[in-house]
Amino acid sequence: MKSILVHPPQQPIQSEIKLAASKSECNRALIINALTGFRSELSNISEARDSQTMLRLLGSEDFEADVIDAGTTMRFLTAYFAVTNQKKRMTGTPRMCERPIGILVDALRILGADIQYEKVEGYPPLLINGFNYSGNNELTMRGDVSSQYISALLLIAPALPAGLTIKLEGEVGSRPYIEMTLNQMAAFGIDYQANWETNVIHIPASRYKEAPYAIESDWSGASYWYSIVALANDAEVELLGLKKDSLQGDSAIAEIMSHLGVESIFTERGVLLRKTHAAPSIGWDFTACPDLAQTVAVCCALKDIPLSLTGIESLKIKETDRVLALQQELKKLGAELKEIETNHLYRVSRIADFPESTPSIHTYDDHRMAMAFAPVGMLHPIIIEEPGVVVKSYPGYWSDLAKVTTWEEL
């Protein structure tokens, strides 16, 4: 499909949605299972392309490992292939090869990995030429770098002869993702010590124990349904497979959306979303949950609720520069995302009426742009270009959306 046109629903929304599995949990579980010798029983494996790519590459004996556009897959597999002494060429799409990986490679080299850059220093493609343990079992890293670098190292730490201690300097970004990694490791028998006052994490040398593990539904995917309920005139949606005490940092969407007019009622099956009163404005630090920023920004723009955002600088090195992409596309809705201070404070506000003609949203080869803007269709017709990008994390998104409103291919 080149584009789709989403129409506002013609009747109240009353639905239940079985969400896709969390690719964040799934990707971690896949690496851990590989380190158990593929002996663990994983259930509810994510159908997201990122996770299916991870699964395929873990089972492949090919020299070249093409992760396509999957950043987590690139980083986790780089660490896994290195510590398991494999020889691989790590590559991906042109955009993937523009996303930095130098911090992770530097850390792996300190531990004993032989990794070379094939083209540009600090970026894929990479040549992994094996591993000869250096004897170093301590690393110091900036805390505000991508949590995927830190998680990649934590996942392989038990396999190192002396384990690993990581000292994080400065503010720790996306801490919930680090905690998710540690909690999943614990589910497979790994003891760890994490002192969040000193930001020191210690993983002893150990072996993962095979164990059954059920992967939770995806809170990132849930965020788009929160936006749908917030924007629709009359809606009640039950999202299946979510847990109140989730490991996923994006479960913060429940609290965020309580300010935007959505109540969360946890049930035995998941969480029921109901409309309630919205606050006149909201401020949020997205450092721990940057993947929610696009959804919340679009929702606030449509509801004319001023939003102050911090903690979104990491969005500039995602599948696209998501800050710039938001700025470009929000303009089409009569809204703006503006940086107002040099300390990375941004604001979303309405600056004009919604246009009379149907806006066409460019998705920049970014799944979250497509899914964050589609809920606009609850109030106004909206065109989403290249809708197939959702396959990266939520392949069934459009079929699920069809349960609550109509859309057509253009």
Image (cartoon, rainbow, N blue to C red):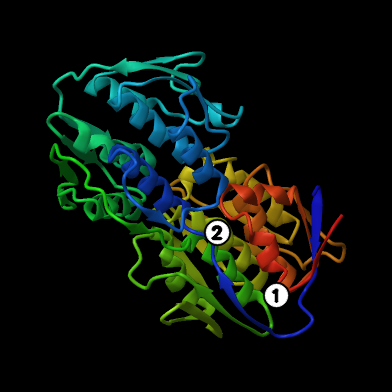
Query: Where residue 31 sits in the image (x, y, percent)?
Result: 36, 41
Above or below, comparing residue 128 to residue 370 in the picture: above
Quadrant into which the C terminus falls? bottom right
Say which residue appears at 14% left-offset and 36% top-offset.
205
Query: Where residue 154 sits in the image (x, y, percent)?
Result: 26, 40
Around disc 2, counting alpha carbons within 10 Å, would you say few (fewer than 14), some (14 to 19), or many (20 or more)? some
Say which residue appears at 39% left-offset and 25% top-offset.
102
Taking depth in this image into account, of 164 and 319 the one nearest to the observer is 164
Callout in the foreground (1, 2): 1
Above or below, comparing residue 367 to residue 116 in the picture: below
42 left or right of 62 in image = left
- The amino acid marked with disc number 2 is Arg
Above or below, comparing residue 227 to residue 176 in the picture: below
Query: Where residue 17 sits in the image (x, y, percent)?
Result: 58, 72
Around disc 1, counting alpha carbons within 10 Å, would you say few (fewer than 14), some (14 to 19), or many (20 or more)? many
What kind of element bears circle 1?
loop
- The amino acid marked with disc number 1 is Val
Q: Disc 1 designates what residue? A: 404
310 left or right of 197 in image = right
Query: Where residue 266 sits in the image (x, y, percent)?
Result: 42, 80
Taking depth in this image into account, of 32 and 346 the one nearest to the observer is 32
Say which residue appears at 72% left-offset and 73% top-offset.
378
Disc 1 to disc 2: CB gap under 8 Å: no
Q: Disc 2 designates what residue? A: 347
365 left or right of 238 in image = right
Residue 253 visible from this viewpoint: yes
